Image (cartoon, grey):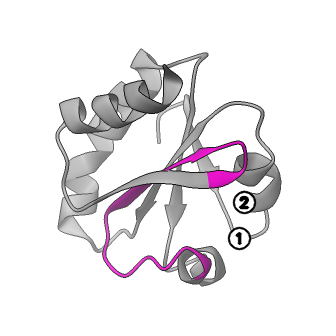
Amino acid sequence: MADNVADFTDASFDSDVVGADVPVLVDFWAPWCGPCRMLAPTIEQIAADYDGKVRVGKLNTDENPNIASTYQIASIPTVMLFKNGEAVDRSVGMAPKEKLAAMLDKHLA
């Protein structure tokens, strides 16, 4: 994982994401998921492009089923944006960088 992409867990989610003082983009994924692996470089690019404005991280749904269940993650990859502790947007499935950037820009404006 890239240096600027955090690794979120069930145990750390409330402090790292819900309690964050900046918007947080969370990539819900699993190692066996081909589209998830294809999305990884895009997530790393977004993390670099939005460094200092948005915290970016990944949550392995196999290892952290409680948070995945809490946010009703039915398909992966799912990318969710959290702002002020609330889930404000989501993208399900493989998404181009432009779609994720537009989602971020809409909520950062």
Residue under numbered circle 2: 13
| Residue 41 falls left or right of residue 18 | left
Q: Quadrant of residue 30?
A: bottom left
Instruction: Say if 28 sits above or below 69 in the image.
Output: above
Q: Secondary structure at mark 1?
A: loop
Question: Which three-letter amino acid code belongs to the residue tagged 1?
Answer: Asp
Question: Which three-letter amino acid code belongs to the residue tagged 2?
Answer: Phe
Residue at point 31%, 46% (across, down) = 40
Q: Secondary structure at mark 2?
A: helix
Crowding near the residue tagged with mark 2, few <14, some 14–19, many ≥20 C-alpha atoms within 10 Å: some
Instruction: Say if 14 sits above or below 101 in the image.
Output: below
Residue at point 51%, 24% (across, down) = 108
Residue at point 63%, 74% (across, down) = 67
| Residue 90 falls left or right of residue 75 | right
Q: Is residue 80 magenta?
A: yes
- Per the rendered image, the range of residues in magenta is 70-86
| Residue 91 falls left or right of residue 7 | left
35 or 81, which is in the foreground?
Answer: 81
Crowding near the residue tagged with mark 1, few <14, some 14–19, many ≥20 C-alpha atoms within 10 Å: some
Q: CA separation, marks 1 and 2?
A: 5 Å
28 or 63, which is in the foreground?
Answer: 28
**x, y (%) of residue 2?**
47, 34
Residue under numbered circle 1: 10
Report if the CB atoms under discs 1 and 2 are less than 8 Å apart.
yes
**x, y (%) of residue 60?**
50, 67
Instruction: Say if 28 sits above or below 102 in the image.
Output: below
Q: Is residue 52 magenta?
A: no
